């Protein structure tokens, strides 16, 4: 092809792109969500599971702040006939969308009135549900029998319904998908049986699979050497994609935490690091191609999935601009990585742990074989429920503090299997736990402050705002607002029910709302008259 | 992460999964164990036992005696077993074989033999699915790896146990009171009822003592010696909390594997 011809083609493409975009009718209705809006969410929305692509759960809203927090009161309450709410609602154009297993509700974000309720009974695991994703006028909802369903956002009518994976093999799903451009990125759950995990991108219009990234490499692929050769270990190796990942448009990579390997508590038939289980991976959102990986728990035998939110933020350190990713991982370690390259920057424990012999040159903890589950029992911290779990962390870019709902937790781990281990092949018995809200300085990994949350295992997520507030709940069921710089309590309300979800905030009609889902009730908090005096 | 039962078609062995039970798990966030299937009838047990022997003699050479694979694939994880209902998929394969894959036909097996094999395989898959637990009848032989003499020395010495406990007093016959695995767990930390007490000094100087009910940063509450619940704002009173299990918490991080198993071996002698 000659150069002139080439230039003409390029000119045609560019003109088509420019004018095509300008002339094309805006296909999103007034109530819909254009995927480009996700790049910089408006103050009046909460359009993804984590509020934005960064996973920080930090809002720039400041109408509710330290000076007026004592006036915070209820704007509305929505009690539901439901199991406990564990989802984070989306809020788009004044409508909330939230879930429990088998159920989606749309409600008026100004007053809590239910607009519609979708129910689809299913078999499968009903342990919890995190929420939906939205693309234009459509919602995306995963089910306990591992289907992905697209609903009309205006009325909850089903557009299409596809099976992501075979529920009879033990697959189910709980997560809220992530929309990146024209991709609905969906994960799967299930580690009772020895099934392989994957992440998949689905066409939002048609439900067709665009790509699938398997969490275990195929024989001959990079990473396959971390599994036994010539056995079926990798093809039954677990690695579920339980939680919603994050996305950086500037490097065009999605970041996902990957679950634990199978058999869960017995690694005898899967000697090796078992990539990409218990890993943080960076993938191309168009192709699902792996860019880099980092493994918080090589060869895990304690159910410490690494699915906690990979939180994205930037810094200037010694005059160098860096794009970072941080995770407070279930295994008790806090990690900071360069999210462009995956290069390791920092590893630091955030609770007392006893399972690692040290940190290797890659920054990954080196598991101590003496702390693997044994038939006669081994004392390990953290227990399998983890130093943290699915509760959302938060990051405040102004203070540089990473907040995590953490636990000191001890268990005795037993490897119970006789013969070839399959499934869990063992279990730990919990001894005791107490919970602490921690603020971690990402530059040093040191814990800046701790706020005791009480005995037992906390399950509340965290929201921070530019109002100088951190919202969470304690183990005696108080809803709390803390000072993020000190951890001091500024405000509390005894709710007498567990918050097993993560708070969110948005502004409507000039009034800032903080939403907390506690037990099976949605509470919307705001200042009287929106703070106007 | 968090687990639960899968959708399994075992209508011949099990009742269908009960939805209220699933909702119960959902309410219990972090420790959802797979619900135990209902107990098997004597007939079902007998069928599984016959199936085990039949499987071993007819199938074990290739698939492993327990069905987890040898020269031929692991059947417990197989798609066909997990989709099978009452042998509808397994029976034709056993009967006709898969000659193209090198599996011979077992034409001479009786229908009842095949039914027994099917029940055995489903029971094996069920066991793997419910392997996320340490059963109460976990065998003591697996736990008894320590040295009771060393355990006694630890009890009276480094462990500091004798400071609060007596093997002829509160711990007399302790090994007869608990299943072995429960004893080991309780030895490190006897969770359950809150045993903490509190002494609360009120603004007028009077003192209320009782069983602690609430102690967070806002409230202190006790059940007093008359059985009445009483609560105060935390910042209006002085409260001294006594936790008799504090020593257990402190010791948890200090046990070596050997300490743990030696001490258990010692307590296990206290029949």
Image: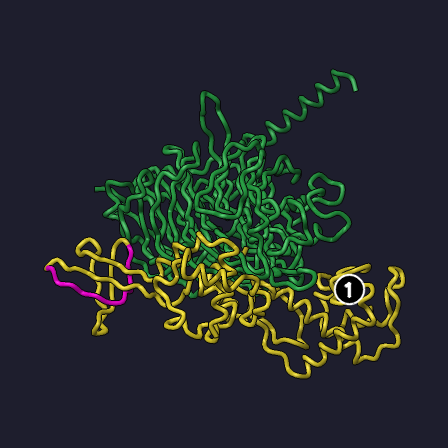
Chain colours: A green, B yellow
Percent from the top left, x then y, of residue A223?
69, 41
Label 1: chain letter: B
Q: In the drawing, does residue B72 fall left or right of residue B3?
A: right
SS at badge 1: loop
Q: Which residue is painted at 33% across and 47% down in the image?
A: A451
In the rendered picture of this protein, how many numbered marks are placed on residues? 1
Q: Is residue A391 magenta?
A: no
Q: Estimate the x, y position of residue A129 in percent, counting from the top left.
A: 50, 56
A187 shown above or below A119: above
Is residue B22 positioned above or below A473 on the image? below
- Identify the residue at image location x=54%, y=50%: A304
Q: Nearer the viewer, residue A31 or A461?
A: A461
Picture quadrant where residue A530 is located? top left
Residue B212 lies in the magenta-colored region? yes
Q: Nearer the viewer, residue B228 or A81?
A: B228
In the displayed structure image, the side of residue B113 where residue B31 appears, left or right:
left
Q: Which residues are magenta?
A: B205-216
Q: Mark 1 packing: few (<14 Cα in 10 Å), some, or many (20+)? A: some
Q: Work out whether residue A155 can be spotted.
A: no
Image quarter in which the N terminus of chain B is found: bottom right
Is the stretch drawn in magenta largely helix, strand or loop?
strand
The vertical placement of B3 against A274, above or below, is below
- Residue A77 lies, in percent from the top left, at 34, 58
Q: Nearer the viewer, residue A160 or B98?
A: B98
Location of mark 1 (residue) = B64
Q: Quadrant of residue A531?
A: top left
**What percent of the width, then of the height, locates residue B218?**
25, 55
């Amino acid at each position: 092809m000659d150069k002139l011809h080439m230039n003409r083609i390029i000119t045609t493409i560019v003109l088509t792109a420019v004018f095509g975009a300008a002339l094309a009718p805006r296909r999103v209705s007034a109530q819909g969500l254009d995927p480009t809006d996700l790049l910089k969410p408006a103050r009046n929305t909460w359009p993804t599971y984590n509020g934005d692509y960064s996973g920080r759960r930090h809002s720039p809203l400041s109408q509710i702040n330290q000076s007026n927090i004592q006036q915070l009161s209820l704007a509305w309450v929505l009690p539901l006939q439901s199991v406990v709410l564990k989802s984070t609602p989306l809020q788009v154009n004044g409508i909330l969308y939230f879930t429990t297993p088998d159920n989606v509700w749309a409600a008026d974000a100004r007053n809590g009135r239910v607009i519609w309720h979708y129910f689809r009974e299913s078999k499968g695991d009903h342990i919890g549900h995190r929420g939906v994703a939205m693309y234009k006028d459509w919602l995306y909802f995963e089910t306990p029998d591992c289907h992905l369903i697209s609903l009309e956002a205006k009325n909850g009518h089903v557009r299409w319904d596809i099976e992501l994976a075979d529920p009879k093999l033990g697959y189910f799903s709980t997560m809220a998908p992530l929309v990146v451009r024209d991709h609905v990125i969906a994960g799967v759950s299930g580690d009772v049986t020895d099934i392989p995990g994957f992440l998949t991108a689905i066409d939002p219009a048609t439900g067709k699979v665009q790509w699938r990234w398997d969490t275990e490499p195929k024989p001959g692929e990079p990473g396959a050497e971390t599994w036994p050769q010539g056995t079926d270990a990798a093809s039954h190796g677990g690695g579920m994609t339980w939680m919603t990942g994050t996305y950086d448009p500037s490097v065009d990579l999605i970041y996902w935490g990957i679950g634990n390997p199978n058999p869960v508590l017995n690694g005898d038939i899967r000697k090796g690091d078992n990539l990409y289980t218990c890993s943080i991976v960076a993938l191309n959102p168009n192709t699902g191609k792996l860019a880099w990986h980092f493994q918080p728990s090589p060869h895990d035998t304690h159910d410490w999935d690494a699915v906690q939110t990979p939180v994205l933020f930037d810094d200037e350190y010694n005059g160098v601009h860096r794009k970072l990713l941080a995770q407070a991982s279930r295994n008790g370690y806090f990690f900071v990585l360069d999210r462009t390259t995956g290069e390791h920057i920092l590893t630091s424990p955030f609770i007392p742990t006893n399972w690692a012999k040290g940190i290797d040159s890659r920054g990954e903890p080196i598991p101590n074989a003496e702390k693997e589950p044994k038939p006669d029992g081994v004392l390990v911290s953290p227990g399998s429920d983890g130093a943290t779990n699915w509760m959302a962390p938060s990051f405040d870019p102004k203070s540089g503090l990473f907040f995590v709902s953490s636990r000191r937790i001890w268990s005795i781990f037993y490897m119970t299997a006789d013969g070839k281990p399959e499934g869990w092949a063992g279990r730990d018995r919990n001894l005791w736990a107490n919970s602490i809200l921690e603020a971690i300085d990402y530059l040093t990994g040191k814990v800046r402050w701790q706020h005791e949350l009480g005995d037992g295992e906390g399950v509340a997520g965290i929201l921070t705002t530019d109002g100088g507030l951190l919202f969470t709940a304690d183990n005696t069921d108080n809803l709390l607002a803390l000072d993020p710089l000190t951890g001091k309590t500024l405000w509390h309300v005894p709710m007498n029910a567990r918050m097993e979800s993560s708070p969110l905030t948005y502004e409507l009609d000039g009034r800032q709302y903080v939403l907390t889902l506690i037990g099976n009730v949605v509470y919307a908090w705001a200042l009287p008259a929106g703070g106007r005096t | 992460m968090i687990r639960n039962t899968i959708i399994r078609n075992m209508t011949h062995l099990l009742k269908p999964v009960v939805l209220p039970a699933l909702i119960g798990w959902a309410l219990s966030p972090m420790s959802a164990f797979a619900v135990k299937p209902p107990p098997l009838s004597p007939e079902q047990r007998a069928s599984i036992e016959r199936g085990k022997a039949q499987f071993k003699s007819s199938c074990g050479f290739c698939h492993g005696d327990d069905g987890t694979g040898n020269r031929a694939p692991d059947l417990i994880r197989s798609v066909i077993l997990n989709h099978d209902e009452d042998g509808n998929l397994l029976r034709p394969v056993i009967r006709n074989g898969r000659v193209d894959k090198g599996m011979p036909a077992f034409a001479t097996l009786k229908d009842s033999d095949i039914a027994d094999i099917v029940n055995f395989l489903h029971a094996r898959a069920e066991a793997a699915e419910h392997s996320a637990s340490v059963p109460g009848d976990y065998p003591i032989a697996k736990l008894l790896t320590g040295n009771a003499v060393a355990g006694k020395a630890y009890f009276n010495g480094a462990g500091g146990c004798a400071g609060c406990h007596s093997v002829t007093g509160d711990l007399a016959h302790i090994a007869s009171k608990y299943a072995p695995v429960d004893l080991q767990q309780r030895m490190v930390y006897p969770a359950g009822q809150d045993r903490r007490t509190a002494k609360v000094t009120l603004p007028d100087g009077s003192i209320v003592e009782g069983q602690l009910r609430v102690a967070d940063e806002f409230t202190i509450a006790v059940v007093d010696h008359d059985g009445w619940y009483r609560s105060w704002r935390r910042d209006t009173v002085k409260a001294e909390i006594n936790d008799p299990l504090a020593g257990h918490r402190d010791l948890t991080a200090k046990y070596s594997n050997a300490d743990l198993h030696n001490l258990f071996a010692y307590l296990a002698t206290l029949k």
